[in-house]
Image (cartoon, rainbow, N blue to C red):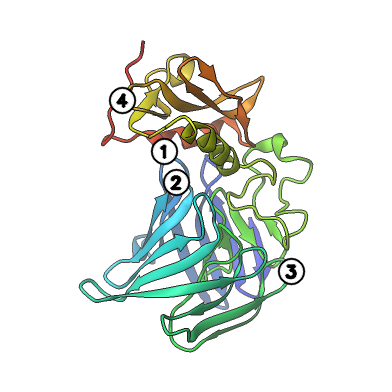
Amino acid sequence: VEKRGRNGTQHYRWDAEHRLTEVAVIRGSTVRRYGYVYDAPGRRVEKHELDAEGKPYNRTTFLWDGMRLAQECRLGRSSSLYIYSDQGSHESLARVDRAAPGEADEVLYYHTDVNGAPEEMTDGGGNIVWEAGYQVWGNLTHEKETRPVQQNLRFQGQYLDRETGLHYNLYRFYDPDIGKFISGDPISIRGGINLYQYAPNPLSWIDPLGLKCGSSYEQARNKALKWLEERGFKAERVNIGKFGSTRGKPVGMTTADGKTGFRIEYDERSGAHINVFSGKDKGEHFLFDASESIVTKLQKLFDLPSKPQRPIS
């Protein structure tokens, strides 16, 4: 796939899981190549530049809290820890920077637009260190720094790759030049008739996962957690599947006694959903938009060696 635009000519390469793994950027006679690495749930954990022999260098690594970016580390240099406005939210609240190992942390604060996109960043004294304005579909009208801070967050759940101009949006990449994703929705026909659409209205809609706008996994998870917390739920043990392809594999979490918990599942009748239970009390199916392959990736989030497993009965 090729794109020609203000960032030069770009060639894209995907893997069998429909994840963007390499971009070649051609500007005049100069060719620069960039590679991307993902973990089992499909989250990008590294980006790097490739030399003439295809060897990676200039690495940036990413750590995740569920489906939210928690930290980025520029190897041998600096790191940034991200803090969000609420549990389950992708709206940025603050960033904790460390210039080098052993140096003091600095907290920078986000000021966001109505749709959660950062418009300003201030230091502890209230001084603006970064500001920007947006066009409707996410391109910047202007960007200004009073000192080098390189603020890369954009619409909720998006991270700007400055080398390509694309926004990493978890399950795929968004191109603000065209206001669309550069690959089809991974939930396939469940994504509707326009599989490249970002949202009906970017001023009032968000798409932090890069999936169809609708009931997201995080919305379903928050509803499920509310139901569980009313029944004293604590995530103390990994819930193991009992049937079919999930038998013996992590599918959720339970309390220590295994009586209260949840399972993330997929079937042809209900699609993607979260089942909750507390003793004999069975809650509703909390449905969300996702394909079976994405549910499998979500289940891998609960492969936690530090937690005991609920035995298969």
* Residue type indicated by callout 1: Leu
Nearer the observer, disc 3 or disc 2? 2
Identify the mark at residue 202; answer none if there is no mark.
Answer: none
The residue sitting at 37% across, 19% down in the picture is 248
The amino acid type, in three-letter code, at marker 3 is: Val
User: Between disc 3 and disc 2, whose residue precedes?
Assistant: 2
Q: On the image, numbered disc 1 is attached to which residue?
A: 301
- Dot 3 lies on which element? loop
Query: In the current view of this chain or complex, which residue is farthest to the top?
Result: 313
Give the CA distance from mark 4 to mark 1.
14 Å
Could you classify mark 2 by the number of other residues whose Cα lies within 10 Å: few (under 14), some (14-19), or many (20 or more)? some
Query: Horizontal and vertical percent for residue 59?
Result: 35, 64
Instruction: Give coordinates of residue 56: x percent, y percent.
Output: 35, 61
User: Is there a contact, CB below 8 Å, between mark 3 and mark 1?
Assistant: no
| Residue type marked 2 | Gly
Q: Residues within 10 Å of mark 4 (few under 14, many from 20)?
A: many
Q: Quickly name the residue at label 3.
A: 136
> Mark 4 vs mark 1: which is more N-terminal?
1
User: Extreme left residue here?
Assistant: 102
Instruction: Determine whether 151 is above or below 60 in the image.
Output: below
Q: Is mark 1 on a helix, strand or loop?
A: helix
Q: Distance between the residues labelled 3 and 4?
A: 47 Å
Q: Mark 3 to mark 2: distance in Å?
A: 29 Å
Image coords of residue 306 (percent x, y): 26, 36
Determine whether the residue tagged by mark 4 lies in a helix, strand or loop. Answer: loop
Q: Nearer the viewer, mark 3 or mark 4?
A: 4
Work out whether 29 lies above or below 40.
below
Q: Nearer the viewer, residue 137 or 34?
A: 137
Q: Along the horizontal axis of the image, is 193 left or right of 281?
A: right
Q: Which amino acid does label 4 sit on?
A: Gln
Instruction: For the residues labelled 2 and 1, say whether their Cβ atoms are less than 8 Å apart.
Output: yes
- Give the vertical position of 49 relative to 108 (above or below): above
